[in-house]
Amino acid sequence: MIPGIPPPASSFPACRIGIYRTRYAGDVLLLVPLLHKIRKSIPDADLFVIVNEGTEYPLKQLGIPHFPFRRESGLAKLNSVRELGRALEKRTFDLWVDLTMSDRSKFFTRRVRSRIKVGAGWKDDHRSSDPYDLFFPYDYDHGPEHVTVFTESVFAGGGLKLPSGVPDFSVPPDIREQEHVDRFLLENDVQGKPLMVIHPGARHWFKRWPPDRFGRTASWWGKKTGGVAVIAGTKEETTLMESVEASMDPEVRRIIVQRSFPFLHALLARATLFVGNDSAPLHLAHSAGTPLIALFGSTTPRVWGPVPTDSAAVFYRPPACSPCMHTGCSMGEENCLLQIRVEDVIETMEDMVKRWETIPS
């Protein structure tokens, strides 16, 4: 930490807070507990959050002012830089927190007007010339604390004391998308049936549980509950989703869904169970309050996962090399996600179903 004396929490009666977090959709969903606590402790706080275009959905649903930065190369990106610069010229902050620490975020941090400027991130990304009054290092691989706990500690270090308590990840689904989901369920004749939503994708191949294991898990679900497996993903994940479908028992009902992020959120709010890898839809399911099974391999759930509860089971069988970002993984049949057996996931699902059956309706 760079030496400095942060202002006391009492100096923020009507706090103007700027947050720079241009990463992925899952990272923005993991900001939600912080945003809930700020609003709870300072109801009139003036928040402004900068995120990447396409990741702003949770902020829209929570009604938080934000700027979606366009990432395309060329003129669109240049225009986005100019637009953000103009937006920041109109604002003055009491506390500015850069949670990205890129060349671009430092560029804007130098120009923003704020009483306190805080940087937080990898130690190796910090330079003595950086424009921060305070810097907080964090190991995004090992933690040791969860990323949401670290983020709150950064704001506390900047003088903003937040209430303790269980983190609230909830985001309300879009009402219009809920209507679309109801129509979708009606058209597919699956209203009232147990829905298991599967997301077999992830940003990197080494973060994906094998599709045939998802298929076997979905087959058990359909036979056990009489329910439906919804295989969700993007157009780029079509082959992956079709591989899951091909490995399922032909008697089990399944639907492949390629819809928008808001639609998936509304669908998850209707779902009985979510099963997926460490990726944005996992955090979306968590924000919808959906019971879930999370599959982790090259990242540690201690840092990036949901807190294990009766309705959130986490599987993590790490070899010595996890966590990693090793795109050329040489572990073969010993790689981290292959250590998670279908039988163990099904056993957990069966325990969940038994608990649900004993809950009075």
Image: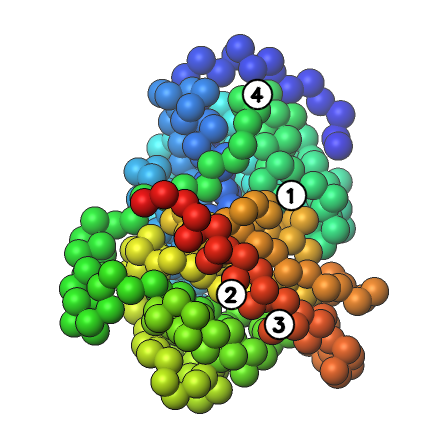
- Residue 342 in the figure: left or right of residue 325: left
- Residue 234 in the figure: left or right of residue 338: left
Helix, strand or loop under label 2: strand
Helix, strand or loop under label 1: loop
Of the two numbered discs 4 and 1 on the same chain, state the one appearing first in sequence. Answer: 1
Structural distance between the alpha carbons of marks 2 and 3: 16 Å
Q: Give the class, few, some or many, for how many residues have Cα within 10 Å of label 2's Cα (few <14, many ≥20).
A: many
Q: Which residue is mark 4?
A: 161
The amino acid marked with disc number 3 is Glu
Helix, strand or loop under label 3: helix
Q: At 42% across and 53% down in the image, what residue appears?
A: 357
Of the two numbered discs 2 and 3 on the same chain, state the one appearing first in sequence. Answer: 2
Q: At 25% across and 61% down in the image, what residue appears?
A: 192
Structural distance between the alpha carbons of marks 2 and 1: 20 Å
Of the two numbered discs 2 and 4 on the same chain, state the one appearing first in sequence. Answer: 4
The reply to whether callout 2 and callout 4 are in contact (CB within 8 Å) is: no
Of the two numbered discs 1 and 3 on the same chain, state the one appearing first in sequence. Answer: 1
Q: At 49% across and 79% down in the image, what residue appears?
A: 215
Helix, strand or loop under label 4: loop
The amino acid marked with disc number 2 is Gly
Asked whether residue 300 is in view, the answer is: yes
Find residue 202 and report its horizontal and vertical position in percent: 53, 69
Q: Which residue is mark 2?
A: 276
Q: Which residue is mark 3?
A: 343
Structural distance between the alpha carbons of marks 1 and 3: 28 Å
